[in-house]
Amino acid sequence: MKFVSKGKFFSRGMAFAAALGLAAFAGPALAQGTNAELVKAKPAGFPTQPIEMTVVYPAGGGADLTARLLAKTMEQLSGSRILVNNRTGGAGMVGHAWLATQAPTDGTAIGMLVNLVWGDSMLRSQGRWSHTDLEPVGYLNSDPMVWFVTTDGPFKDKTAQQVIQAAKEKPGTIRVATVPGSMWDYNIEQVEAQTGAKFLRVPFQSGGAGVVGLIGNNVDVALGFYAEAKPHLDAAKVRGVGVAAGERLAHLKDVPTLNEALNGKDYLWTLVRFVVVPKATPADRKAYLGAMVKAAMQDQGLRGEYAKLGVYFDPTLEKAPNITEALNKEAEREREFYVKTGRLK
């Protein structure tokens, strides 16, 4: 299951944007020339106008800057003009609805989305549109959730299993930072249901705020993303005890996955970034746009800029023979969670 909360996304975006903004101007150069094979693969007469890449969140945030780096690389490799347009409002709902119901279907409209679109579709669209109206054509990267503790607190030398065991032996006493109605709650809810533990949930407006609360000894455990905890990791004030991903992260090699720590298989709580087109887009143009994204994501300059931020390149999604099917499978897993927990009938 790969979820994220709306309020958290903007806070996460601030940390992501700060680093990415510097990278965009000071990092190594991205792709320097066109990709000959990609240029030859262009459908006849396409495109005759700039391609618009929609971002459903405001300019300057993590999604916006991710999209702008991607668009720049795609432009350089393909020779086609790509314009990033922020269609904001309703915490993403406005842009999601526009892409699904109003965007041109001639191949000149693409969207750089995160998996929030699935929750919007299933829980908030009121049946007016569906994420299935959009077809994924390329995977970018992911941001798994990490469980953090302080290096001088009660769990300074404990494992994730020991933290959870403490919450089982002394129910309601281990304080954990959460963002109500979000993947933070879902992650904790899943752990409690499968282990018998019971945490005392302390609400915060964002995961970043929860990490600050951890430093201030207001909670014993905080869940968050690598970028927002990186300054505290570098200062040796916090340490990770578990990662909600399918495998360990390159930048946190000593931190086991929650699946490892708890002998599970479904502790997967991750922000996923990908590119979509309206489903009615012609097949040849859809395939070409997907090839553009793939070529960009093979560019070492772009990957390097993203990697600096601690993002995770999910090997399953990167190597998926059909990215549409792979991401739709993740969306279905999310739907099953909503049904199982009574959020969706």
Image (spheres, rainbow, N blue to C red):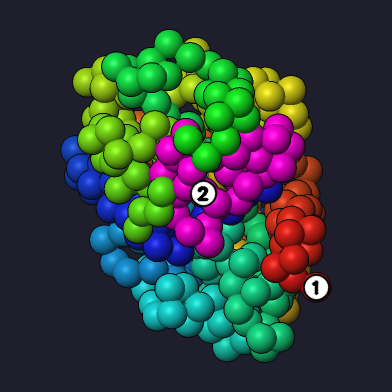
Under mark 2, the amino acid is Trp
Task: Report the front residue among 304 and 342.
Answer: 342
**Within-10-Å neighbours for mark 1: few <14, some 14–19, many 20+:** few
| Residue at which label 1 appears | 345
The residue shown at (60%, 51%) is: 186
Q: Is residue 271 visible?
A: no
In percent of width and height, residue 165 lies at 61, 23
The residue shown at (53%, 16%) is: 159
Residue 179 covered by magenta stretch: yes
* Secondary structure of the residue carrying numbered label 2: helix
Q: Is residue 200 left or right of 214 when viewed as pictured?
A: right
In percent of width and height, residue 125 lies at 63, 82
Quarter placement of the C terminus: bottom right
In percent of width and height, residue 78 lies at 49, 55
- Picture disc at residue 184: 2
Per the model, the C-alpha gap separating discs 1 and 2 is 22 Å
Residue 121 covered by magenta stretch: no
Location of residue 168 by image quarter: top right
Q: Which segment did they paint magenta?
A: 174-201
- Picture disc at residue 111: none
* Secondary structure of the residue carrying numbered label 1: loop
